[in-house]
Amino acid sequence: MAKLVTQNHPALHSIADEVPLDEIQSPAIKKILKDMRIALDSYNINGFNGVAIAAPQIGVALRIFLVHNTSTDKREKDIIPDMVAINPRLIKLSKKKHLVGEGCLSVGEDYGAVERSTHATLRAYDADGKEYERGASGLLAQIFQHEVDHLDGILFVDKAERVWHKDDAEAKKFREAGVEDDE
Ligand code: ZN
């Protein structure tokens, strides 16, 4: 199942299960990661691309997300690196928050203003089953929070302070004024 499920799919609204550690390198998990990459890379609606995807978005209720930046620009690659996060936990979230623009592969036409911590530290396992920690600020910190929310059945529209249609003039104004992304 390499396709995105629709917004009402139960996997998008429930708490996903942890991946047993001895199964991280199994063919089943490799297949899920591959399907997630295909679904992410094939998403393009009106020029909107995604940079991250969580397993529930393809209907798999497991705690996995990946970040994949198709940009060839090195600076952008530094801001948003390729990552696999299995059983991720946000072990630190800054008290300092900001209001940022957000979209989602699973919420096609909407764009919202969401309050996110400016800094976040993630602890997770990579595709080889190795545990790692990664601190992030700005856009990558926002991606961490958005994706971990997916694993807890939360969509950005559930917590957004404002939601607009993507083409709404106000959404455009907000997007141009602030941090921009579309994961
Ligand atoms: Zn999303």
Image (spheres, rainbow, N blue to C red):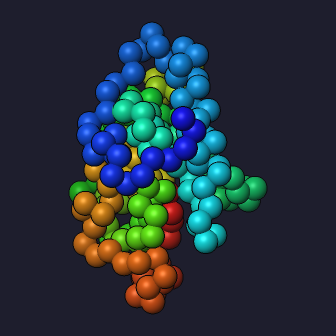
Give the residue at the far right of this rendering: 72
From the top left corner, tell me how far across and down residue 159 is, in percent.
Answer: 24, 62
In the image, residue 49 above or below residue 69: below
Quarter of image, res 67: top right
From the top left corner, tell me how far across and down residue 63 is, in percent.
Answer: 38, 32
Between residue 139 and residue 41, name the one nearer to us.
Answer: 41
In the image, residue 172 above or below residue 78: below
From the top left corner, tell me how far across and down residue 106 is, in percent.
Answer: 43, 55
The residue sitting at 25% across, 72% down in the picture is 161
The residue sitting at 75% across, 56% down in the picture is 72
Residue 133 can be seen in this image:
no
The residue sitting at 28% across, 67% down in the picture is 160
In the image, residue 131 above or below residue 43: above
**Drawn side of residue 1 relative to residue 116, left or right:** right
How many marks overall? 0
**Drawn side of residue 103 relative to residue 79, left or right:** left
The residue sitting at 58% across, 48% down in the picture is 40
Give the residue at the far top of this rendering: 22
Residue 94 can be seen in this image:
yes
From the top left corner, tell me how far across and down residue 121 is, in percent.
Answer: 38, 43
Give the residue at the far bottom of this rendering: 169
The N terminus - image quarter: top right
**Drawn side of residue 45 relative to residue 12, left or right:** right
Between residue 173 and residue 11, name the one nearer to us.
Answer: 11
